[in-house]
């Protein structure tokens, strides 16, 4: 217990306050309080989450500088960090997982999400390569698990591929499409699992033909780029 042995004033300023949308600004306010002496563990959590929120804000500011985000400050204000996966999922209406593209990581993450999230919450993965049946088969709540594959940057390229496992319920897929559409994305229904889903397979076919045309001397790389950008 990181709060064990702290004074009443210290306990009135727990580490989880950091997970407010004000991020590093709040961290600075907390640490300026005269009776605040955080433990080493508490300090590490504060710094870690302040850094995470600040990193998101910096990324949004960079996009705004190039005219790719209309209101970076407003977007950053909607970001809240949590100290554990369970805390983040416990009150969520919809979960979008964005972890590493590693099968064992997906399995472990979805096992934890399935235990922590409310029963009606849809659990979607952003994976572009691993079908949902490979990491959800043993879960009690597997019927609510699916792939919702967006494209980077999603606010500029709105397509989202919604693909369930054989056991994913139609209601879960419908709910996912509803959520994506409500935030301005363009969801499509991938009717059954296929490696690479739809977009990556189309991209692969296009790239293979592009490499062949250039490699066999039919056109230059520059003219190929011009064909794609202006055609």
Image (cartoon, rainbow, N blue to C red):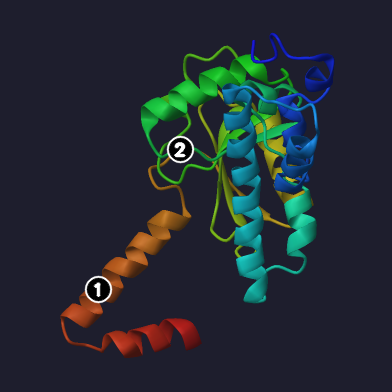
Residue drawn at 60 percent across, 60 percent down: 59
Characterize the local packing of mark 2: few (<14), some (14-19) or many (20 or more) Cα atoms within 10 angstroms. Answer: some
Task: Identify the residue at image location x=78%, y=51%.
Answer: 77
Q: Is residue 197 visible?
A: yes
Residue 83 image offset from top left, x and y in percent: 63, 27
Q: From what the image shows, is residue 171 above or below residue 65?
A: above
* Viewport quadrant of the N terminus: top right
Query: Does 27 sit above or below residue 43?
Result: below
Rounded to the nearest whole Å, what is the CA distance between mark 2 and mark 1?
28 Å
Left or right of 214 in this view: 14? right
Location of residue 65 in the rendering, given as x and y in whole percent from the top left corner: 65, 74
Residue 92, visible in the rendered structure: no
Q: Are marks 2 and 1 in contact (CB under 8 Å)?
A: no
Q: Nearer the viewer, residue 19 or 177?
A: 19
| Residue in view at x 28 percent, y 72 percent | 209
Residue at point 69%, 44% (across, down): 177
Provide residue 149's location: percent of width, then percent of height.
Answer: 54, 47
| Residue on which disc 1 sits | 211
Sort mark 1 into few (<14), some (14-19) or many (20+) by Cα contacts within 10 Å: few
Up-down relation of residue 229 to residue 91 (above or below): below
Disc 1 on helix, strand or loop? helix
Question: Residue 123: which numbered mark, if any?
Answer: none
The circle drawn on residue 193 is 2
| Eye-nearest disc, 2 or 1 | 1
Q: Secondary structure at mark 2?
A: loop
Tell me which label, 2 or 1, sits earlier in the chain: 2
């Amino acid at each position: 217990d990181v709060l064990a042995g702290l004074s009443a004033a210290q306990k009135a300023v727990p580490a989880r306050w950091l997970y407010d949308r004000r991020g590093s600004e709040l961290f600075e306010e907390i640490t300026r309080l005269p009776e605040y002496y955080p433990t080493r563990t508490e300090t590490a959590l504060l710094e870690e989450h302040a850094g995470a929120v600040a990193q998101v804000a910096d990324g949004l500011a960079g996009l705004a500088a190039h005219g790719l985000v209309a209101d970076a400050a407003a977007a950053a204000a909607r970001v809240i960090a949590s100290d554990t996966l369970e805390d983040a999922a416990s009150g969520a209406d919809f979960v979008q997982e964005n972890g590493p593209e590693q099968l064992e990581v997906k399995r472990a993450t979805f096992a934890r999400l399935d235990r922590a999230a409310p029963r009606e919450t849809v659990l979607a993965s952003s994976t572009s390569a691993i079908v949902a049946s490979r990491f959800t088969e043993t879960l009690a709540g597997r019927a609510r698990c699916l792939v919702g594959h967006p494209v980077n940057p999603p606010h500029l390229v709105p397509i989202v591929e919604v693909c369930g496992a054989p056991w994913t319920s139609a209601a879960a897929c419908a709910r996912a499409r509803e959520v994506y559409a409500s935030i301005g994305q363009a969801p499509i229904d991938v009717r059954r699992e296929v490696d690479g889903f739809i977009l990556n397979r189309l991209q692969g076919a296009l790239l293979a033909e592009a490499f062949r045309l250039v490699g066999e001397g039919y056109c230059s790389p520059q003219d190929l780029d011009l064909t794609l950008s202006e055609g």
